[in-house]
Image (spheres, rainbow, N blue to C red):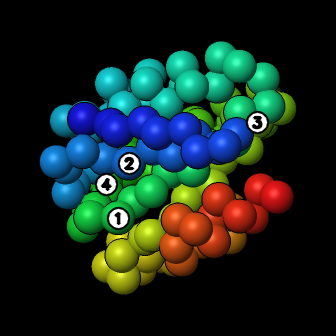
Amino acid sequence: MLKVEKTTDVTVVKFDNVDRFNALITEPVKEQLKSLFNTPETKLVLNLEGIRFIDSSGFGVFLSIMKTAANNHGHFKICNIGDEVMELFKLLQLHNVFEIHNSLEECVSSFL
C-alpha cells in the first residue's frame, strides 16, 4: 500500500497502486506512517503523486501524522498534490497547515 524509500536522511513515502486515500485504507496507512517516527527527528515526505481523491479520514491521518512528527521532534512535509486534491486542501484551509511543495526534489531539498 505504501512504498518507503530513504534518500540521504529523508524518508520518502508514496502510495503504491492506490489513487484514493479514503476510510478503507486510512488505519493501516496511519499506523505505518506513525511507525516511521519511532526514531526522533525523522524527516518524512509524503509524495501524493497519483492520488486523485482524499476523504475526511485521509485528512485526519495527515493531521495525526503531523502531531506525531511534532511530538518526536520530526518533520512532515507533503509534495506532488494534484489540482483536484489541492482544491480539497484549500477548501479545508489545510494548505495553510501543512508544508506543501510542488515537486519531490523541491520538498527533499527544503530540509537542507
Question: Label 2 is placed on what type of residue?
Answer: Lys
Q: Is residue 8 left or right of residue 14?
A: right
Give me the residue at 71% from left, 64% from top. 109
Question: Label 4 is placed on what type of residue?
Answer: Asp
Residue 104 picture location, percent across and down = 53, 65
From mark 4 to mark 3, how far is it between C-alphas? 25 Å
Q: Please tell me which of labels 4 and 3 falls first in the chain.
A: 4
Q: Please tell me which of labels 2 and 3 falls first in the chain.
A: 2
Q: How crowded is mark 1: few (under 14 residues within 10 Å), some or many (20 or more)?
A: some
**Whether residue 65 is situated above or below residue 35 in the rendered picture:** below
From mark 2 to mark 1, how far is it between C-alphas? 7 Å
Q: How crowded is mark 3: few (under 14 residues within 10 Å), some or many (20 or more)?
A: some
Whether residue 101 appears in this view of the structure is yes
Give me the residue at 45% from left, 69% from top. 80
Q: In this view, does 47 lie to the left or right of 54?
A: right
Is 49 or 30 nearer to us in this picture? Answer: 49
Residue 8 picture location, percent across and down = 66, 43
Asked if disc 2 and disc 1 are in contact, CB closer than 8 Å, the reply is yes
Q: Which of marks 2 and 4 is in front?
A: 2
Q: Nearer the viewer, mark 4 or mark 3?
A: 3
Asked if disc 4 and disc 1 are in contact, CB closer than 8 Å, the reply is no
Q: Name the residue under label 1.
A: 49
Q: Mark 3 points at which residue?
A: 74
Q: Name the residue under label 4.
A: 55
